[in-house]
């Protein structure tokens, strides 16, 4: 493939920036167009699973990522009363060749932005450029961006345009103008971070409760001044039945009074949910939303990637991970294919159905399904957890999700990465 291709990336988030780094590593020189004018380390925590970390390692980023985040070593599912439902090792401890890293989303984005500017040059990222339209004419993608400050429109042409502009993607909206708002399952998430001593050994992920009321926590860093851990936490509550559109913006300041009373007695050995929540800074409120899988990502010389292609519920730690893999697969195909069209077909064939299965599995709670089963079967019964939910069934749920999401350790360790020579 001709390395002088013009490649435009709409979206300067984690996925768009990873795509830029991956394409650069393969010898291309993409340009990223980001709608936000002044980047800032916003957001809360995310997990990068070993198959994403493998790809970032191939980009030479592992050591610095480990300095920014936390290498997670185990996962614990608990009932709302603190009884252990499922435990498994994670990352290197689980036998993967790469760690699992929990990290602040904003810190990761700023890190990747710095790397793009270092490796591709400062002009490789153009801030404040909001996509207004995209189409393919002949063998070129044509796009129009509007400067958010001046309102000035700029028309560009590219051999290929990547829509990595998130769940509210303007690129996707061009292809599916009647799709409407994201799909909300009626669950609201309140999210923040707290400086505390991270529970359960300091490198553990905690999932407790059930889908209608759940607490999630994991460390994403350490505060140098206090020596305390920066603990990312999430409180989920089912607030309406499925089907209604989200009533408010998907990222707004939240109020403890709206959810914390429901978690007032969630206190177990080493875990005190009210104490963790009350130690936090600003709390953000999100609806749990996704979109239906679509039958096509690529239209002419434009294609979708990450949340623009397959937005999914934040279950199983797969959102950012799958987007990073998209970016690497796309660069791999573009470097090896004989034409842009062949590369786009190969990329979509590799990723669209795979990610659609994860979207649908997450709607059924993915690996978190074990919590719902435990709660449902223990409710009103005097039996033991083992009696109502045998360990073999729990193991099968975890194993099935790993297989679907592409991180079964034996398979992953034996498979090649998507690295290509530049």
Image (tube, rainbow, N blue to C red):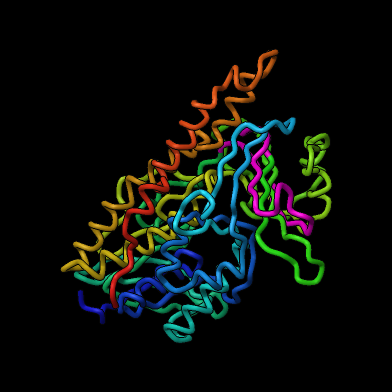
Say left or right for 419 vs 92.
Answer: left
Could you tell me residue 220's position as x and y percent?
65, 59
Q: Position of residue 406 (x, y in %)?
A: 39, 47
Give the quadrant of residue 360.
top left
Q: Residue at x 61, y 36 (%)?
A: 186
**Residue at position x 49%, y 78% in the image:** 115
Q: Residue at x 41, y 64 (%)?
A: 55
- 113 falls in the magenta region: no
Q: Nearer the viewer, residue 24 or 189?
A: 24
Residue nearer the viewer, 174 or 159: 159
The reply, left or right, for residue 216 in relation to residue 129 is right
Task: Please state which of residues 185 and 110 is positioned toward the viewer in this rendering.
Answer: 110
Q: Where is 217 relative to 369, above or below?
A: below
Identify the magenta region.
185-214
Decide whether the magenta segment is chiefly helix, strand or loop. strand
Residue 174 image-quadrant placement:
bottom left
User: Which quarter of the image is occupied by the C terminus?
Assistant: bottom left
In the picture as drawn, the residue positioned furthest to the left comes out as 338
Q: Can you see residue 117?
A: yes
* 190 falls in the magenta region: yes
Please report the residue visible at 43 percent of the width from the left and 67 percent of the height from the top: 132
Counting from the top left corner in percent of width and height, residue 343 is at 23, 63
In the rendered structure, the answer to whether residue 5 lies left or right of residue 417 reads left
For the residue pair 330 and 77, the one nearer the viewer reads as 77
């Amino acid at each position: 493939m001709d390395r002088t291709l013009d490649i435009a990336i709409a979206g300067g988030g984690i996925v768009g920036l990873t795509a830029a780094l991956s394409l650069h590593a393969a010898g291309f020189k993409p340009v990223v167009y980001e709608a936000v004018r002044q980047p800032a380390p916003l957001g809360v925590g995310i997990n990068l699973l070993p198959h994403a970390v493998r790809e970032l390692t191939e980009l030479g980023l592992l050591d610095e990522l480990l300095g920014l985040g936390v290498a997670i070593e185990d996962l614990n599912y608990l009932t709302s009363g603190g009884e252990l439902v499922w435990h498994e090792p994670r990352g290197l401890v689980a036998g993967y060749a790469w760690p699992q890293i929990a990290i602040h989303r904003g810190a990761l984005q700023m890190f990747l932005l710095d790397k793009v500017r270092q490796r591709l040059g400062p002009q490789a990222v153009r801030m404040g450029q909001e996509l207004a339209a995209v189409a393919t004419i002949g063998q070129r993608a044509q796009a129009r961006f509007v400067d958010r400050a001046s309102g000035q429109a700029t028309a560009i042409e590219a051999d290929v345009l990547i829509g990595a502009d998130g769940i509210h993607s303007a690129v996707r909206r061009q292809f599916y103008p009647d799709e409407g708002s994201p799909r909300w399952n009626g669950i609201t998430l309140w999210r923040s971070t707290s400086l505390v001593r991270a529970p359960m050994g300091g490198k553990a992920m905690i999932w407790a409760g059930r889908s209608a009321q759940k607490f999630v926590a994991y460390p994403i860093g350490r505060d140098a001044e206090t020596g305390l851990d920066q603990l990312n936490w999430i409180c989920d509550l089912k607030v309406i039945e499925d089907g209604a559109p989200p009533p408010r913006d998907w990222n707004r300041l939240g109020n403890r009074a709206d959810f914390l009373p429901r978690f007032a007695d969630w206190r177990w050995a080493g875990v005190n949910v009210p104490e963790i929540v009350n130690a936090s800074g600003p709390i953000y409120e999100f609806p749990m939303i996704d979109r239906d899988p679509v039958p096509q990502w690529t239209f002419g010389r434009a294609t979708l990637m990450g949340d623009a292609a397959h937005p999914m519920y934040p279950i199983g730690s797969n959102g950012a991970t799958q987007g990073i893999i998209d970016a690497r697969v796309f660069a791999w195909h573009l470097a090896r294919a004989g034409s842009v069209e062949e590369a786009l077909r190969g990329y979509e064939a590799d990723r669209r159905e795979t990610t659609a299965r994860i979207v649908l599995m997450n709607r059924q709670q993915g690996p978190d399904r074990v919590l719902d089963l435990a709660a449902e079967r223990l409710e009103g019964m005097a039996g033991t957890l083992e009696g109502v939910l045998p360990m073999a069934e729990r193991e099968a749920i975890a194993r099935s999700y790993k297989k679907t999401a592409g991180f079964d350790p034996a398979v992953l360790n034996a498979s090649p990465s998507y690295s290509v020579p530049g």
